[in-house]
Structure formats: structure tokens, C-alpha cells
Amino acid sequence: MPATSYLRRLCACLALGLLVGCRPEPAKPLDQQLYVWQRQWRPAHEQALAESRADFSTLRVLALQAQPQAGWSRALVDLSRLKADGRPVIAVVRLDGQLPALDLDVARTQIGQMLADWQAAGLNPSGLEIDHDSASARLAGYTDFLLKLREQLPPGLKLSITALPAWLDSPQLPALLRAVDSSVLQVHAVSNPRLGLFDPVQARKWAERWSHVTERPFYLALPAYGMALLPDTGGVPLVESETPLNRGGERRELLADPQQLADLGHQLRDKPPAHLAGLIWFRLPLPGDRRAWSLTTLAAVARGDALSGRWLVELSSQDGLYDISLVNVGNLDQALPPRVELSAEQCDGVDGLSGYTLQALPQHLVFNRQSSARVAAGGRRALGWARCIRIDQGAWHVYP
């Protein structure tokens, strides 16, 4: 090989190596964790935990709470089921923000006994999270509480806190964050409820500001649920979420938009703020939790999958009697459609179900929605029944 040709090839290889070496390393995947926030565990937890295992690395489990009037109470956690799940567990202690003061001695006793009971059941939490909505003016006292509490915790148990964006303006925040191993910045349901449940633009701004204050890992707590606002006689709306309130009145439903959260997740993966370690989703959904996303939608958002909702009309018939159902075959929970039409012939008996009325026209069956509801991804809803000579399985339309 001529010397000049060899040199050209050598230079080309060196240049290619330099280019490859200068490429930025791909961003680390964001850890995906899950809050388990039910105060009383049910048999349904077993399946929900099993189905969530592939997509969520760690469970943050409500374990203990203190409230101004009710005092201290344990969440009734199925410890054997939690142990069998096998994932790392962080026990969450909820200290209500309206408590007049934080009693360190009582807190230490309650938390110590809870940890001892968990360990006796063979469950060793990897961390403890304190969830306390402290007023900004009381952060110095909260910092002192955490430092003293940490001295009493078992060696190696990581301590974290749930944190509020309102603390960003406090000069005490850096000292507070140095008192713990990590923080969880809650960016949902932190403003006036009339302004909504979640604002993705504001959430990203808070995360960026938080990254400039903390020197330690932090997580974002993101919503996978909805809530309702009820009017109150004092002019301040009441919030109803996972626990129904025994109060009448019109409810204004608010729901975190999965597509908004999916878009935010893509932005955070592409350009994560400094020290952002992952995302924690609130909350593990169980059957009957009508204000939580389905686990199918939640997992799709956490993975960064493209979201799509698609309806399928299914028929089952016997001796000319048709049962008609609507199936959500996408990975996105959807509101019931306002109207569904089918091609049909000679129908002499019809009726709508599940909030739909059914009108029989000469060549069509028309279902009109009378009440709103959501159908989970993979779920189905009975539309009604009809006795007809024929219904065309392939000739149906869902509007919109």
C-alpha cells in the first residue's frame, strides 16, 4: 500500500475516533417509582403490584400519619404481600401541615415502633420519607426536627422529604436539603385548586429552580389521578380525591392529562435538570378508583410510549338478541363518546345502558350519551341491547 494512501486512512480513522469520542453521552434513564397511598390494603393490591413490577423500580408506601384531631394512625399495610413483591420499599410518614408543632419524642417513638414492626415481618425498608407541608416560616424548626430524627434512625436508612415549590423563596431551604439524603418535589395540587391540578410548564420551571438549590438527588412527584372540587359555604372549595366526601353538591372534576405528563417526561429525559434522579407517580391504581389513571395508561406514560385511544364496538347475539358493548382497545383512558351509530335492520326492541339512550331508526341504531364517565384502557362498557334481524358488525361509527 502506498505511504500516502496509508496516511489518509490513518488520518480518517483518527478523525472518526475523535468525533465518536466527542459525542455527548446519552442521558441516563429516569428512575420510575410509585406511591402506594391506600390507607387500608385490599386483596386487589396483589394483582396491581404484580402488574406494576416491570415499569416501576421502587414503592413508596404510606405507612403512618399524624393529624391534628385524630392523632397518630397506621396505614393497614399488608406487610407479607409487600415483602413478597420484592422491590425496594420506602416507608412514608405523613405529618399534616396543620399540626401546631412537631413533637420529636412522639414522632421518634411512633416511627421507631413502625419500623420495628415492619422488620419483625421480614421487611427492611431502604428509606424513610417524611411528608410534611410545612409553612415556609417554620422551615428552620422543621430542619432541626429532621436533624434530630436522623440521629435516631437505624444506620444506613436513607432519609428523604416531600417538598413544596413554595419553599423555593426561603433562605432556609439549602440547610433543609442538606439535612436529608434526597428530596421529592411535589408539583401537583400545590396551588389554588381553582387554578387546576397540574401545570406542566410551571412544573418544569420549579424543577429547574430546585436543581440550582439542591446539591443532592431529587425526584419529581407527578399526578396520575383526578380530583373534584365541591363548593363550600365559606367560599373555599373542598377537594375530593381518593376518599369520597359525605357532602352533596355539584362536583367540578379535574384530571391530570396523560398526554401533558407524557410530553413533560420526554422533555425531562432529553434535558434533565441537574440532580434529577427520577419520577414518582401518585398513585398505584386499584379497581374502583375512578379518579386514578388505569395502570395501562400510567405505565405507558412512564415508559414514554406513544399514547392512543381507540374504540371498538363488539356484538354478541343469540336468536336475534344483540348485546352491544364499547371497548377501549388503546393504551389511553378515554371519556365515553357522545354518540355511537350502528347499521341495523328491522329492530323491534331496543334499550340503552350505562348512561346511554338508544334510538332505533329505519337503518341505524343511535346511542346518545346522557352522563359522562371514563373507560380505562382495555376496559369495556355495555351500550345496550337490541332485537334485530341483522346488525352489521363492521358498520359502526363513534363520534367524535
Image (spheres, helix red, strand yellow):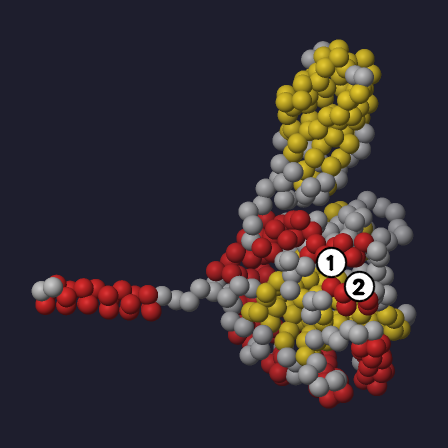
Amino acid type, mark 2: Arg
Q: Quadrant of the N terminus?
A: bottom left
Asked if 171 appears above or below 205 in the picture, the reply is: below
Q: Residues within 10 Å of mark 1 (few under 14, many from 20)?
A: many
Residue 237 showing in the rendered view: no
Q: Is residue 210 visible?
A: yes
* Residue 142: quadrant of the picture: bottom right
What residue would you read off at disc 1?
Answer: 49
What's the amino acid at mark 1?
Leu
**Disc 1 or 2, which lies upstream in sequence?**
1
Q: Nearer the viewer, residue 158 or 390?
A: 390
Q: Is residue 337 left or right of residue 111?
A: left
Q: Closest to the observer: 109 or 286?
A: 286
Q: Position of residue 97 (x, y in %)?
A: 78, 71
Q: Residue at x 73, y 26 (%)?
A: 315
Query: Which secondary structure lies at badge 2?
Result: helix
Choose top left, top right, bottom left or bottom right for residue 45: bottom right
Q: Quadrant of the C terminus?
A: top right
Residue 152: x %, y % from top left: 76, 87
Residue 341 position, x and y percent, is 68, 23
How far separated are the C-alphas under marks 1 and 2? 9 Å
Residue at 71% in and 18% down: 391
Return the mark for residue 81. 2
Position of residue 335 relative to residue 317, above or below, is: below
Which image quadrant for residue 125? bottom right
- Left of 24 or right of it: where is 107? right
Callout 1–callout 2 Cβ contact below 8 Å: yes
Local secondary structure at mark 1:
helix
The residue located at (84%, 56%) in the rendering is 43
* Label placed on residue 98: none
Front position in the image: 149 or 250: 149
Say which residue appears at 33% left-offset and 65% top-offset. Answer: 20
